Amino acid sequence: MRISALADAAGLPLATVKYYLREGLLHPGVATSATQATYDTSHLRRLRLIRALTGAVGLSVQQARTILALVDDPGDDLYATLGRAVSALPPTVAEASADDPDPYPRARAALEALGQVYDPGFAAVAQLESALAASEAAGMPISDERLLAYGRRLRDIAAFDLERMPREPHAAVEYTVLGTALYEPVILALRRLAHQDVAARRDLGG
Amino acid sequence: MRISALADAAGLPLATVKYYLREGLLHPGVATSATQATYDTSHLRRLRLIRALTGAVGLSVQQARTILALVDDPGDDLYATLGRAVSALPPTVAEASADDPDPYPRARAALEALGQVYDPGFAAVAQLESALAASEAAGMPISDERLLAYGRRLRDIAAFDLERMPREPHAAVEYTVLGTALYEPVILALRRLAHQDVAARRDLGG
DNA sequence: AATATTGGAGAGTCTCACTATCTAATCATG
DNA sequence: CATGATTAGATAGTGAGACTCTCCAATATT
């Protein structure tokens, strides 16, 4: 398959495919001459993944590149790889100053209330802190009760996710990293729909 | 309070505050002369809300303006208002062509499996469709089992949210619209942290 | 032989979210 | 009350990001 056929198959403008090649999101085809290369289904699959990440998930090209690089070339430590993936995901959050003894007080309190480990090195802790701070600043702080309600259900979801993790290391990384990113929009959409559904039922009931 | 004091209090550059005024995100102060106006704590609160929406929640200025307009001036129909808010939230999704008999097949099947109402006019349905399609295109389709697992927990979360809704209509709209947007980053961060926690426990246990 | 396509590089475009500059009027202060 | 600082409001400029276009020489295809 030549590049224009690839672009057609993916439903993308040729110029965009060339752009992704240039940016290193898409691996080059096999060169057959100075002005020709062939592409296969791996390129097509990759393009679909790129569009899923930059589209529905809402990543920038830079963020998508980071995620793709982790999937392509995971280290031997699933933990560290997941950590790197999470810190590439939005929201991007400023790094805490090294000398702050308690950089994420809200997140620390929240995790203690939930009985979960608090590791300030994990990017999601900073993300939680900024999300809690934003809610508070906007005048809608999150109560402990709400935190517990949310935390318990999300823990169930996370447990479900991990139960399905493939055993083979490379597949496990791919599943974990992509599953974290790709399923987030599903989760948000389901919550929004559940609001509607629960409200509808409540009204009908009385 | 004058505009520079307001900017200082909010921790924002003066030029940015002026920009929000121009864009209609921030209501004008009370003019005391041709070149002077005074601002109060309502302006400060609004600035904090704007930054929460454009920062942690990740909305564009245009999206934030839509959300803020809904909170400021809700219709008498909470349903319709929530619907408008949801369609202002990312991901932005293309409208289905009017003559398509089944524009959201994946979302329809999903909601049927969950036993929830399927209303193709609700923006979150289109968002769910695009999230499911993206997962599928990326090679990680969502099984019914997973959908049920997620759906049940998110329904619990939604039920919790609605139980806490204030009675007074204006407050209810504010709570619902802002709660939908502001708590989403919290939910994503908690899931990411739960992955880490569950994985850690699993490793310790076996 | 004539026409089309390609890889690769560079430049152009469009949107966004600010950020800066300017002007005339008004304030604050010594 | 003179003088420097601020202000509202308008216009213009900036830098990043994600494409999109144009070129060119070298093949491919017909």
Image (cartoon, coloured by chain):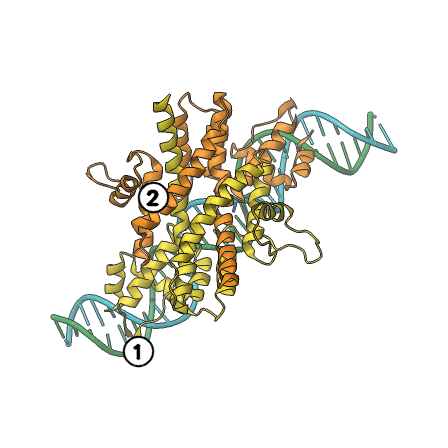
Chain colours: A yellow, B orange, C cyan, D green
Q: What amino acid is labelled 1 in the image? A: Ala
According to the image, label 1 marks what residue? Answer: A34
In the rendered image, residue B102, in percent from the top left (x then y), is placed at 21, 40
- Is B43 situated above or below D15? above
Q: From mark 1 to mark 2, how far is it between C-alphas?
A: 45 Å
- Residue A124 versus residue B100 in the image, above or below: below
Q: Secondary structure at mark 2?
A: helix
Residue placed under numbered mark 2 in the picture:
B128
Q: Nearer the viewer, residue B205 or C16?
A: B205
Residue found at x 35% / y 43%: B127
Q: Is residue B155 above or below residue A65?
A: above
* Chain letter of the residue carrying label 2: B
Looking at the image, which is closer to me, B109 or A87?
Answer: B109
Can I make out residue A31 in this image? yes
Mark 1: give few (<14), some (14-19) or many (20+) Cα within 10 Å.
few
In the picture, residue B118 is in which quadrant? Answer: top left
- Examine the rendered structure and indicate whether residue B157 appears above or below residue A75: above
Chain that bears disc 1: A
Question: Is A100 on the left or on the right of A36, as rendered?
Answer: right
Q: Nearer the viewer, mark 1 or mark 2?
A: 2
Residue type (three-letter) at the residue carrying disc 2: Leu
Please tell me how crowded label 2 is: few (under 14), some (14-19), or many (20+) other residues with Cα within 10 Å.
Answer: many
